Amino acid sequence: EKDKLLLRYKQKRHAASGAEPSKDDPVHRLSAEVLRLKAERDQFGESGPEASAKRLQKKYAKVSSYAKNLERENSSLRSKLQDAMDDMKRLINDRAKLIDISNMLRCDLQHAMGTAPSASATVPDPGRVPPSHPTVHTMEDNIRKLIEEN
């Protein structure tokens, strides 16, 4: 804009002096070339290599920030998973202890009452395997092994 004004001023000055500016005049040619180069720079400045580099840097910053957020979320989820696995191990152990305590209390109650085990106590429930049964221990051992592996 400033250069266009300067060129117009020079043209007016030449016109006032009575001499017509020549296109061969070196000042006129240089001014025209400067204007052309500035116009070209303005036109291609937004899509030149510097602008492309800036756009790529902005995209990289966004992607990098997103990746860091994903890493934090991943770490948080891994921590929650580990806590859940620890809770499962604890619950499995607590379950085994409760079954043992229940069996001991049942035995103590029957012994204190001086009665023989009732029919319901001697006849196993088809859906429940007695804790002393080897299958229960094998299954619990397998579950513990799986938890430890994971």
Image: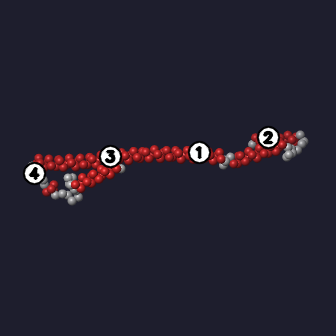
Task: State if disc 1 and disc 4 touch (CB < 8 Å).
Answer: no
Q: CA distance from mark 2 to mark 1?
A: 38 Å
Marks 3 and 4, how far apart in space?
40 Å
Question: Which label is found at residue 6?
Answer: 2
Is residue 9 found left or right of 139 in the rendered image?
right
Q: Secondary structure at mark 1?
A: helix
Give the number of the mark in front: 4 or 2. Answer: 4
Question: Measuring 90% from the left and 42% from the top, which residue is drawn there?
Answer: 18
Amino acid type of disc 1? Gln
The residue tagged 3 is 87
The residue under label 1 is 57
Whether tag 3 and tag 1 are in contact, CB under 8 A, the answer is no
Residue topped by disc 4: 115
Q: What residue is drawn where x is 77% and y is 41%?
A: 3
Tell me the amino acid under the disc marked 2. Answer: Leu
- Which residue is at the far bottom? 126
- Please provide percent x and percent y for residue 143: 30, 52
| Front disc: 3 or 2 | 3
